[in-house]
Amino acid sequence: MNSDRFELFGIDLFKIIIVVAVTAFCLLFFGLLAGSERFIDDTMAWYGSFHYYVESLASGHFPYWDPYMMTGSYFYPNISHHGLLEPVVLVLAFIRKTAGISLLTLYCYFLIFRLVVFTLGAFFFYRYVTKSNMSAIVAALVLFFALPPSYFRQNGAIDVIYLTPFALYFCLLFFEAPSGRPKYLYLFCLALISGISMNIYIPAYYLFNFVAFLLLLFLLRIVRIGELTGFLRQRKSCLSLAAAILLVAMMTAPPVMVLLKDASGGELFPILRITHKNNGNLKRIVASEVTSSSLSGKFCNNLGVFSSYGNLVNLLYADMRDIPFFRNHRFLSEIGQYIGLVPFIFCMLGFIYSKSRYRWLAIIMLVLSAINMFSFEGIVSRPYNTLQMIFNEIFPPLKMVECRETFGSFFLFYLCLLLGLGLQLLFDGEKFRQIAKEKYRQILLMGAMVILLKILITWYFGAKIVFSSKQDIFVLAQVILFLILVFLYARRKVTKKGIVIALLSLVFTDLFLYNYVLKTSILLPRQDLDNLFGEGTRSTGDFQFFREPIVAPPHLAFAESILKTKGVLAYGSNHTLFSTKRYYDLLTNVPAENQLTLGGVSYPIVRFFPANDTIKYDRKQTLQHLARAKAEEIPHRLLIEIGKPAMPEALGELKDFAEYEDLRELNPDLDLLQEFTSWYLTQQGQALKDRRDNFDRFLHTPEYSLAVQEFSLNDITVSVKNDNDGYLFYGDGWSKYWRAFDGDREIPLSIANYNSKAVYLEKGAHTVRFVFDPRHYKIGLAFYYCGLFFLIGIISFLYVTKKKPFQGPVLQNFSC
C-alpha cells in the first residue's frame, strides 16, 4: 500500500473525506432520508413489486401469484426481475413485521443501501488496483455522487449490477492469495455474489462483464494461467471449485425454471419487451405461440434501447438536459455519464502516465461497454448495429438484454478505475510534481482540448459559445483553476497538501452542485403516495368480489397490488415484464367493454353456473366468441374450453377491432382510459351500481349458494351448495399450475372464459379449494435457498476456523 497519508488539523484526511461525503449526501437528500420525499419515474414504478413481496412475506405468505395484477397473474418472475430473493429483503420483511416501518421508507433505504454497497465494492476494487487508500476513496466517492441523478430516476442503473464490484474484487483476491483458507474464502465469496446476481433481472449484464473481465486478466497477463493450473493440481482445490460452481448453479435455479418451464414453455409471454419493440402494435404477433425464442430478439424485431451521443457529450456537461436540442430530441438517456471535468482529465492522466496494466483493462472494458451501450440514432428502440450483432452472437445471453443503456453504469465504473489510477499519481506527490513539471504542456493541452470541445459543442447545438447556466460556467472555471494549480505545484508555489485539498474541493463542489441542480427532477414530495396507499387499511387476506376499474396512477406501476384492487385496464401494467399468453390474447383481441365485464368489474369474481348455462368451445372458438359477443351477453353464459390447448398459428378471420386500438395498448394515455371507463360506468348506470351493491343475489339463489371461506395470495376456498350440476367459476387468471380440490380429493380444473378457471361439481355440498402450485419454480426456489445457506455456512466456517488471525485485504480497515 502506498504511503499516501494526509492530515488536516491533526485529523486523517481519509476520515475527513468520508465525513464530508456522508454530510453532503445527507444535506442533498435529507427529504429522502427523513421520509418526506420519494423517487420518480422507473425507480418509483418498480416500488409496487417490492411492496407486494415484502408485505406478503411479513404477512406470512410467499407470493407466487398476484391476484390483483392483470386479473390474476404470475408474480414470481418479478421476484427474480427485481432481485427480491436476496437475503437483505428477508431482513426488511422482518423489520416490517416487527417494527411496522412504512414499506415506502424501507424501499428508499433499500435502494440507498444498494448504492452504498456498489460504492463500497468499487472502493475495495480500486484500492486493490491502485494500492492507494486515498486514490480509491476519492474515485469511489466520485462514482457515488455521479450516480444518484441516474439511479434515483432509473434504478436499473445499479440494481442489476450492484454486487459486481465485489465480485471483481474477490476474483482478484482469489488469484492473488496463496493456497489455503483465504483462497477458498475468496472463491466462495465470489460464488455467493454470483448466485445472488443470477437472480437480479436478466443476469446477462453480470455474466457478460465478468466473463470479459476474467478473459482480460489472462490476456493482459495480469493473472498468469499457471497460477490457475497450479491451484487445480490439488484435489482439494478441484473439489472446492466444483462445489462453488455447483452452488452457483443451484442458486440460479429460479430464473432457469422461469426460462425453461414457463417463458419458453408457452405459459408466460414477455409482454413488455414485445409491445415496446413493436411500437404498440400488439396484434402483429398476437397469434404466435411462446417458444424458445420468446426472450431473444425475434419477438422484439431485434431492437434495443440505447444511450446516444448525448451521453457521450454528457461527459463534459453537468446540465445536459438544459440544452434544448438534447431535451427535445431525446438524445440523452436516463443513465448519465457526468463525473466532472477535473476527474475526467485525471482519467486521461491515469491512462497516459500510469504504468499499471489495469489501465488497458479499464480502456478495453470501457470500449466493450460503449459498443453495447451506444447507438448514434437516438435512445428510442433501434436496430442493433453490426458490432452489437457480433457481440450478440459471441455471447448469446446478450440477446435477452434490450435495455442496453444500463451498460452506462459499467462505463462509469471503469471510467472511475482510470480516475483512481490518475489520482494515484496525485497522491504519490513527487511523481505528480515531476509529471506536472515535465509534462505541463501536455496537461495544458488536455485542459485546452476539453474547453475547446465544450465550446464547439455548445456553439453547434446551443448557438452560443458558452452555455449560459451558472453551473456550466463553474465547470469551465474549474478546468482553468486546475491548470493553474498544476502549474503552481510544478513550480513549488503550492504544497502537496495544498493541491490535494484544492483539487478535492473543486471535484466534490462540482458533484454536489450536479446533484443539487438535478434533485428536483429525481425526487418529489411523498405525501401524494402516502395518501394514495393508505398503508395498513387493507391486508393481503381480504377478498373482494368485484374489481375496481383503473386504479393505478401514471407514475406508479403495480399500484393495484398496493391498493389491493384491480382494474382490467389498469395503467400500471405498463411495467409488467411478463403476462400469461391468454391474458395477452384477451387484451389484444377483445373489446375493452367486454374485458371489463369478463374481469370482475361488472359481476362478482366468484359465481356458479348451472350446466345448462355453459357452452363448450375449443380455444380458437372461445376467443372468437368473446371478441364478437355483446357485453350484455357475456355474463349469462360460461365458456368451457375443450380440445387441445395449442393455439392456431393465425387468427386472420378475427374481426379487427380498430375502434379499440388505442385502448388495447399496454401503455395508453391515462386520460383516454379514464374517459373510456367514465363512459362505461355511465353507460352501465344504475344497473351496475345495483349489481355491485347487491352482489349477494349472485351468491345465493334458490338453486345454489356459495361463500368464500378463506383467501390468500396463492389460494382460495369456496363452499358451495348446489341443487343442480354445474361449474364453480373463479374469474381469476389461468395458469397450468392451478389445481383444484373438493375436500381432500383433487378434481379436474377447466379453462373458462379463455383466461379464467372453473370446476365441474355434481349437485350437493362442496368445499372447493383452488391452489396455485408452481412446482417447477418451488423446486428452483428450494435449490436457491439450499445454495444460499450452504454458501453462507461455508464462508462462516472458513472465516471462524482460521488457524491464525486473518489480515488479508478484505479485513483491512479504512485508515492508512
Image (tube, rainbow, N blue to C red):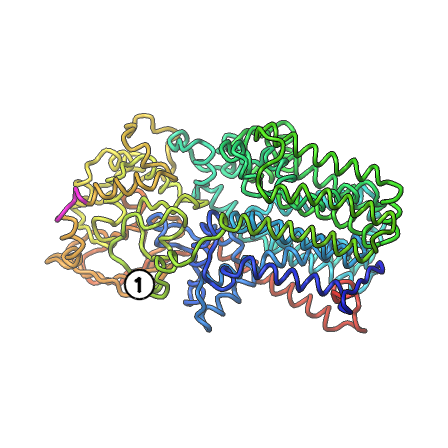
Q: Nearer the viewer, residue 264 or 711?
A: 711
Q: Amino acid at mark 1?
A: Asp
| Residue at disc 1, secondary structure | loop
Residue at point 65%, 43% (across, down): 475
Left or right of 619? Residue 342 is right
Q: Position of residue 507 (x, y in %)?
A: 69, 50
Residue 535 higher or lower than 266, as above or below = below
Q: Position of residue 652 (x, y in %)?
A: 33, 26
Can you see residue 170? no
Toward which corner of the image does residue 573 lie, by quadrant?
A: top left
Q: Nearer the viewer, residue 234 or 334?
A: 334
Residue 14 higher or lower than 684, as above or below = below
Q: Quadrant of the C terminus?
A: bottom right
Toward which corner of the image does residue 718 lie, by quadrant?
A: bottom left
Q: Position of residue 723 (x, y in %)?
A: 14, 58
Most prominent secondary structure in the magenta stretch?
Answer: helix
Residue occupied by mark 1: 542
Residue 451 higher or lower than 612, as above or below = above
Left or right of 502? Residue 70 is left
292 magenta-colored: no
Residue 380 higher or lower than 250, as above or below = above
Left or right of 190? Residue 783 is left
| Magenta-drawn segment | 682-686
Q: Position of residue 479 (x, y in %)?
A: 72, 43
Residue at point 60%, 44% (across, down): 471
Badge 1: residue crowd in 10 Å (few <14, some 14–19, many ≥20): few
Kindly give the residue lying farthest to the front in the view shown.
493
